[in-house]
Amino acid sequence: MNDGHRPRVCFYGDDFTGATDTLATATEAGLRSLLFLRVPDRRQLEAAGALDCLGIAGAARSMAPAEMREELEPVARFFAGLQPPVTHYKICSTFDSAPHVGNIGTALAVWRQHIDNDFVPIVGGQPNLQRYCLFSNLYAAVNGGGEVFRIDRHQTMRNHPVTPMHEADMRVHLAGQSMQVAAIHAPAYAGNAERLDAEVERIVQAHPDAVLFDVGDAAHLPPIGRQIWRHAQRQPLLAIGASSVVQALCAHWREQDGLPAPAIDATRIAAAEGAVFVLAGSLSPVTARQVAAAESYERIALDARRLIDGDQAYIGAMLSRIAQRLNAGNHVLACTADGAHLGGERVSLRLAQASGDFLRRLLPLTTARRIGVAGGDTSSHALKALDIWGLSYLGKLSPGVALCRAHADGEREDGIELMLKGGQMGGEDLFDRLANGV
């Protein structure tokens, strides 16, 4: 699998929840994988051992361009030193981004300083999450098994508080982020491989910033993976997309008998030993339904405004109340649902940061060893607040939602089991699955 200790794939996740989905995808495929929460030092790399897939989780999706450049440059330098054939800039499967926040063109410009391959594939859908890209237009289900809408008519994504999606054609959407994007549409996969090779070569010769590949179903992934790997064998490249980038590569490698058997059974998760704490900072309708459906928990509402304002008397009282219930053996689900009425991009960010700080202060007060965090930004800031340097994959709670083991130097955090989920991910019984096992 490895060329020495050189990974086949290195990826940066632009939010923590999406990064754990890519970690799950790689591990389930049989790749030795670990997700770091920052650029690792030599000691952490040695502790991780030989890896086929090395990830770094970040929060670039919630950053302005200048902050993104500061975040991504050290990661790009680190990956360049490892020299993987494929570097994957992992974005959300709904492509939620904008010129002023999470700008994908800004990320591409950073990596251009370290990877000069003209071929930058963008994988445009992830069918196992009901995300589809056809003739460059993006579609997504409202929730698991729900009706599929074009992204600009999707009731959640068109009204996203930070990055509302008003354009379905991803070429146009990315043009607003200073990217000239060419496209390969789904009918091209029906021909022979050599014809697709020639079409990709023709497009690359025109020097677009990137090439968007349609993904309408899982059968489209192997030919895309073949194109990525074929070009990566000539020269290291950057690929952009959701976990479907790794899915495409693994689908191609599987056809070539180039993958080992998975080391874990990701379909089985034991019930939690002791109390479970869930912090629901997401404001999405999907998470709201999951909160309402959770039968295994005592629900406690957190006042979003008082968290944001740093009301220490209130925060201290809520920390004590929740810790007492957890230490008595009760599963607790704390949510900031009233944050939906506050509105505003900076308010959402401040609430995510305040929620992360709340979790950091809670953990030393309890014996809870299985923790769930709902909301992409909330998850990112919650993990940043903890003294954890890495995550390995334990199993799948729901499509797009992984249970992971924390790696840390301190005994309190090391070995904690973490579920991090984006607002659109998971079935209604997700939180009960976290407590009761799969």
Image: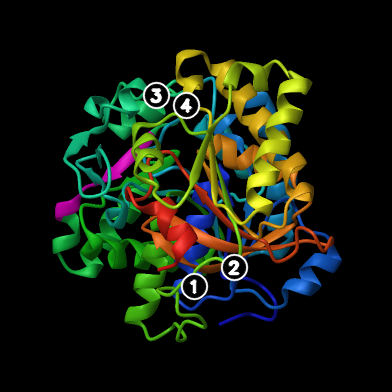
State yes or no: discs 2 and 1 in contact (Cβ < 8 Å): yes
Q: Which badge, 2 or 3, is on the more N-terminal residue? A: 3
Quadrant containing the C terminus is: bottom left
Identify residue type, mark 1.
Ala
Identify residue type, mark 3.
His
Please tell me which residue lies in front, 339 or 294: 294
Identify residue type, mark 2.
Glu
- How many other residues sit within 10 Å of disc 3, few (<14), some (14-19) or many (≥20)? some
Q: Which badge, 2 or 4, is on the more N-terminal residue? A: 2
Horizontal and vertical percent position of residue 286: 34, 38
Query: CA–CA distance between discs 2 and 1?
Result: 9 Å
Instruction: Name the residue beneath numbered marker 4.
Output: 337
Query: CA–CA distance between discs 1 and 4?
Result: 29 Å
394 magenta-colored: no
Please tell me which residue lies in front, 383 or 296: 296
Left or right? Give the position of 21 relative to 57. left
Instruction: Name the residue beneath numbered marker 3.
Output: 160
Instruction: Name the residue beneath numbered marker 2.
Output: 273
Is disc 1 placed on a helix, strand or loop?
loop
Instruction: Name the residue beneath numbered marker 1.
Output: 270
Left or right? Give the position of 20 relative to 291. right
Looking at the image, is 377 positioned above or below residue 39? Answer: above
Horizontal and vertical percent position of residue 188: 18, 55
Query: CA–CA distance between discs 1 and 3?
Result: 35 Å
- How many other residues sit within 10 Å of disc 4, few (<14), some (14-19) or many (≥20)? some
Identify residue type, mark 4.
Ala
Left or right? Give the position of 425 relative to 361. left
Residues drawn in magenta: 181-187
186 magenta-colored: yes
